[in-house]
Amino acid sequence: MKHAKILGMAAAAVVGATALQAPAPQAPAQAARTAPVIEIEARDGGFTAPATHTAGPTSFRVTTTATAELGSMIGLVRLHPGTSPATFADRLGKVFSDDPEVAVPAGNALMDEADLLGGAQAHPGRATTFTARLRPGTYYLVDYLDFEDGAPPGPEALHALTVRRERHRGHAPRPGAFVGMSRTPSGPRFHVAPRLRAGAPILLTNRMRQVNEAIFVPVRPGTTRDDLQEFWDAAESGEWIEPPFAGDPVGTPPLSHGTSVILQAPLEPGEYALITWVTDLTDGRPLGAKGMHALVTVK
């Protein structure tokens, strides 16, 4: 999951208690209520968010004033019974290690200890919203970028969100596009249409048996998949070549296997790469170096 150190699926059946589905069509007289929105305001040194909420599909609107190059990357997690915030924070910090012998075991342990439910990367003046289904219990919000450089900030970086048994009647946004992530005979791949409509909610589903993310980054005109592969090949070998990227990344931080999230990102018309910085937890290699990247046009 090392973004900063380098950069500066057709819809499948959605499974799991945290998965999302588009609401069924309704008669005009029974128009669905939209999901309630939790406002998250990020800044340098932290973020603010409510401490309680009701159960059901819920949207999180992330805004930031952070001056960091990558903005803020707010994620939602739910710890498994027996996992403490301190254990999770320690494990997450190790996932970002440069040493695969540290990062890979930590990543595999993390999958057994928590559900990573995605989130949103935002930049100043450009809000990003994600929608997840909340069940009663305790969740945590975290800025993943706090864990990338230097010593992890510790459990105090996790913001507890208690979801009450009371349920609201809102529905998740209806997706207008779909992104899947899976392993194929050719290697790990994104599955996405070559063209997306600007402003359309995107349903992202992780079918890999490990955590993974999906990040949209503007690219220079004429960029090809070969250019993307060349970039990752060079990065993996420790060489430096000019990145094909040409703008701020937005997307969702890691999702656990079998988990979905709906993303509403400020994607303006143009050419984008769909990428991941996550490490393959089977061998420690970057998933991007194994061909997990795609090019899309936003209209």
Image (cartoon, rainbow, N blue to C red):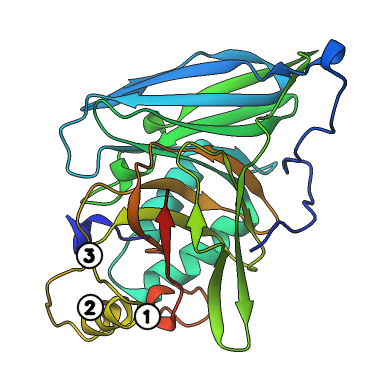
The residue at 25%/46% (across/down) is: 248
Residue 83 visible from this viewpoint:
no
Vertical placement of residue 80 versus 180, above or below: above
Task: Tell which circle, 1 or 3, labels the residue nearer the N-terminal end.
Answer: 3
The span from disc 3 to disc 2 (Cα, nearest Å) is 21 Å
**Amino acid at dot 2:** Ala
Q: Where residue 198 appears, x then y in whole percent?
A: 45, 41
What residue sits right under mark 3 in the picture?
A: 221
What residue sits right under mark 2 in the picture?
A: 235
Task: Tell which circle, 3 or 2, labels the residue nearer the N-terminal end.
Answer: 3
Neighbours of disc 3 within 10 Å: few (<14), some (14-19), many (20+): few
Q: Quick one: 237 or 268, which is closer to the camera?
A: 268
Q: Quick one: 80 or 141, which is closer to the camera?
A: 141
What residue sits right under mark 1 in the picture?
A: 289
Tell me the SS state at disc 1: helix
Q: Quick one: 99 or 148, which is closer to the camera?
A: 148
Q: Where residue 201 appears, x then y in whole percent?
A: 56, 38
Tell me the SS state at disc 2: helix
